[in-house]
Image (cartoon, coloured by chain):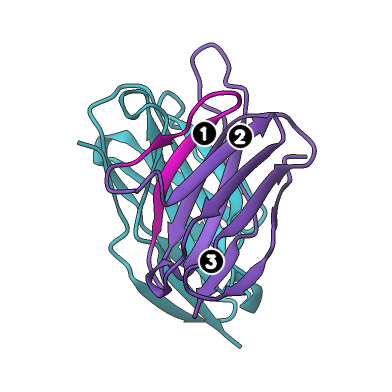
Chain colours: A purple, B cyan
Amino acid sequence: GAVVSQHPSRVICKSGTSVKIECRSLDFQATTMFWYRQFPKQSLMLMATSNEGSKATYEQGVEKDKFLINHASLTLSTLTVTSAHPEDSSFYICSASREAGPSFQETQYFGPGTRLLVL
Amino acid sequence: AQKVTQAQTEISVVEKEDVTLDCVYETRDTTYYLFWYKQPPSGELVFLIRRNSFDEQNEISGRYSWNFQKSTSSFNFTITASQVVDSAVYFCALSATSGTYKYIFGTGTRLKVLA
């Protein structure tokens, strides 16, 4: 169990267009989903945390109007990169965790990632 | 402040050798979790292990073993009899209560297992 999918796996777009990336938990309900960005040969950088039915919490320095996050259901979160530019090219990874217990944090299960190339 | 340090940027070993990946963490919380993930060239992070701060028992899973020592704030990962398929980037992560359960990732260790 605990499978997370992402779609698309790879996308190439022109500068100025918007790109939507979907993250789905396939066999569990995800109260919380996380969006990360990873540059080549670097670690993961948390962009935002989204909770089902509420607004996402963005990390410092991440433009919320640039990276729109919607967590409309317990199995789906979307990240939309608006007016993409070449500097937005990166590997975007989502993760999901089951509803946390009384005081413990569940493991994050990661999707396969989406490689975005903006020309 | 919370921090995870993986001092080994890249390690190369020959197949069948044992290799240990180091992870040192910093946190003031008494309740926290430590994780190891594997990221093969395909990019997907694969969950390997989760350990809470109250459980210092070492764990073995097949060729993988983990050594958690609170006294040295370390959570090291050993692969016994390494195989080419073990080649990947390995990340250690910390999740603590004061960090609202966000993961603090280390910078990763790239392991290359040569045939």
Q: Which mark is residue A71?
A: 2
- Which one is nearer the viewer's eye here, B11 or A38? A38
Circle nearer the viewer, 1 or 3: 3
The amino acid type found where label 2 is placed reads His
Q: Of helix, strand and loop, which one carries label 2?
A: strand
Labels 2 & 3 near each other (Cβ < 8 A): no
- Do marks 2 and 3 share a chain? yes
Q: Quadrant of the N terminus of chain A?
A: top right
Labels 1 & 2 near each other (Cβ < 8 A): yes
Circle nearer the viewer, 2 or 3: 3
Q: First in sequence, mark 2 or 3: give its number.
A: 3
Q: Which residues are magenta?
A: A43-59
Q: First in sequence, mark 1 or 3: give its number.
A: 3
- A32 displayed left or right of A86: right
- Which residue in the protein does label 1 denote? A50
Q: Is residue A29 visible?
A: yes
**Rendered view: A70 above or below A116:** above
| Label 2 – label 3 distance at C-alpha | 22 Å
